[in-house]
Image: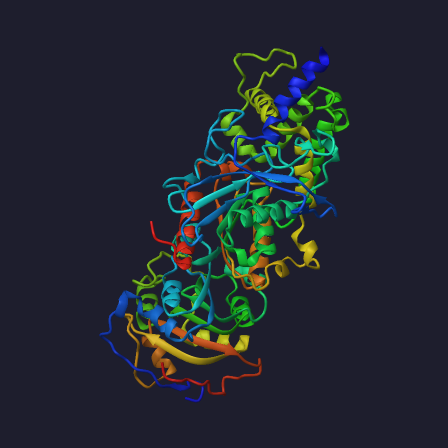
Amino acid sequence: MADIGATLDLADRTREADDPHSPVVRFGLDKPLRLDAGVDLAPFQIAYQTYGTLDAARSNAVLICHALTGDQHVVNDHPVTGKPGWWETMVGPGKPIDSERYFVICPNVVGGCMGTSGPASTNPATGMPWGLDFPVITVRDMVRAQAMLLDHLGIESLFAVTGGSMGAMQVLQCAASYPRRVFAALPIAGSTRHSAQNIAFHEVGRQAVMADPDWRGGRYFAEGTNPRRGLAVARMGAHITYLSDAALHRKFGRRFQDRDNPTFSFDADFQVESYLRHQGITFVERFDANSYLYLTRAMDYFDLAADYDGVVAEAFRGAPTRFCVISFTSDWLFPTSESRAIVHALNAAGARVSFAEITTDKGHDAFLLDEPELFAIVRGFLDGAAKARGLPGR
Amino acid sequence: MTMLSRLKYDLTMAEAARGPGGSRVDLLVVADMVQRGARVLDVGCGDGELLRLLESRGVDGRGIELSREGVNECVAKGLAVVQGDADTDLEDYPDDAFDYVILSQTLQATRRPRVVLEHMLRIGSHGIVSFPNFGHWRIRLQIFFGGHMPRTDNLPYAWYETPNIHFCSIKDFRELCHAAGAKMQQAVALNAWGGRMRLKMPWWFWNLFGEQAVFLLSRSHKTIGKHRKPEFPLA
């Protein structure tokens, strides 16, 4: 009986990974994804969402690259949680990334768990989820897969590519790997390489997952378990890094949660504790623990300069792309200094670059939040780029 | 008189502060010094008016601006502007990255004007500098008779809140150019109405009656001395 329960649970939990609520492109054995790890992934699939209409000249496509725990559901309700899309403030009709002007595409990254091949997907060789048999992937692999999706959709050249955090890494990699295919690039709160501090945070998160007895060496699907506690702790720790001291203080201070006095226990006395626990619990509903390991690893491995003899500028030498780099004052995970390094490299490469630092106390997550200045800059930059590309005005 | 090299320039006292197309005359003077198709870095580009003017003339323009509002306004206009500080960020630009580096009404607001000037001529083969002339007679009168720091239409700030921390006169700037190894290729003074001064006059006259000055500079050997006449093609 336990086996049946586990099987049902398995089918339920891997459904979104194999047969998602999104359009899917399946690449056969004849079209493998060449991975940096030195292996071919085939067959594999990419799930994606689109918004708006591709114009006749196929010139108005905007690629959105999602962050570590994001997915392709940018402005539609999430099929698992039912919550609104993660970038509804930025994307949609009349929004800075205007789906009435642009054809917006957002694929789920390779290694993800929302329909693009990843460790939660079924390994065709075994009929079971890949788990840790899935090859380790890199940001460049994600971008290669996106290029294959664009080829499939018949989009030779992107009007723009944008994303925050891990999304910004993909933006930079995309512009470096395919300079002729990217007219405008908007990396937000990103970096050309993952810092030692950020690798350290990721390692804590991974260790939390792997320390959960339910992780079972990554074989939790097969064994009918789910390392919820480990993944929730990883998420709690990471979530702190996405905020700022000022934001936490403004939101929660030292206020108690539904009580007037401390309980002299380890209950969630403080609002901030309750909030973090909630963040952890809701995260595990929609995210796969192994995916978390793979995607954090991909970010850790990201170092754009490494492919160009240690000189980031070489990645963008002669790039025709126009860039707009954006950072946030209170972001200590991807601080402004990282964005400035991108700008310096782009300047050294002679690329056309704009850079703005936005004043906010909301930390790294500011790119997802209501930041009017961010919207004005993105809108203005895209308007200018649209004009230069000859797209019709709004 | 040898120290005060004579210049040829025109004086049109009644010329409006805004020229054809509505652009500020000082910006038009700067823009006229830039070759079509050139790569230009405008340091302290403000709201991007000069960059826009340059781009309308087929120039590939980039900007640096300290104020966030200025950057946002520029980016919203589709201009390539980075938020940055002339005093600290120029050193990150590679040699010979631009044909022209422009400091339009910016030099007097920098902490280390000489270092900024030297970086300009390292990053660009030419530099264009415009600044309010502190040697103008009205400023001299205000200090001399008023006994206080001058305030004019072009320099409206009180001394304790002005961003302009390194005022200089045209004469002072020439000395800086010599010290920094900058060769003056062209010089234009603007009168109190913003018009180009078009009379053949010696430097002291400019220094007294020019309210603003615009200089086109190029690299030179440090050995250039005050005795050596700069080249001054007509504005």
Q: Residue at x 42, y 80 (%)?
A: B186
Q: Which residue is farthest left? A: B14
- B109 or A47: nearer the viewer: A47
| The quadrant where residue A66 appears | top right
How many numbered discs, if any? 0
Q: On the rendered image, what quadrant is the N terminus of chain A found in?
A: top right
Q: Residue at x 57, y 21 (%)?
A: A278
Q: Which residue is farthest right? A: A217
Residue A262 position, x and y percent, is 59, 13
Residue B32 position, x and y percent, is 37, 75
Residue A325 position, x and y percent, is 52, 51
In the figure, is residue A83 to the left or right of A168? Answer: left
- B28 or B217: nearer the viewer: B28
| The quadrant where residue A264 appears | top right
Residue A20 position, x and y percent, is 56, 31
Colour mapping used in the image: rainbow
B123 up-or-down from A104: above or below: below
In the figure, is residue A338 to the left or right of A186? Answer: right
Q: Is residue B135 visible?
A: no
B234 up-or-down from A198: above or below: below
| The quadrant where residue A13 appears | top right
A25 up-or-down from A215: above or below: below
Q: Is residue A380 visible?
A: yes
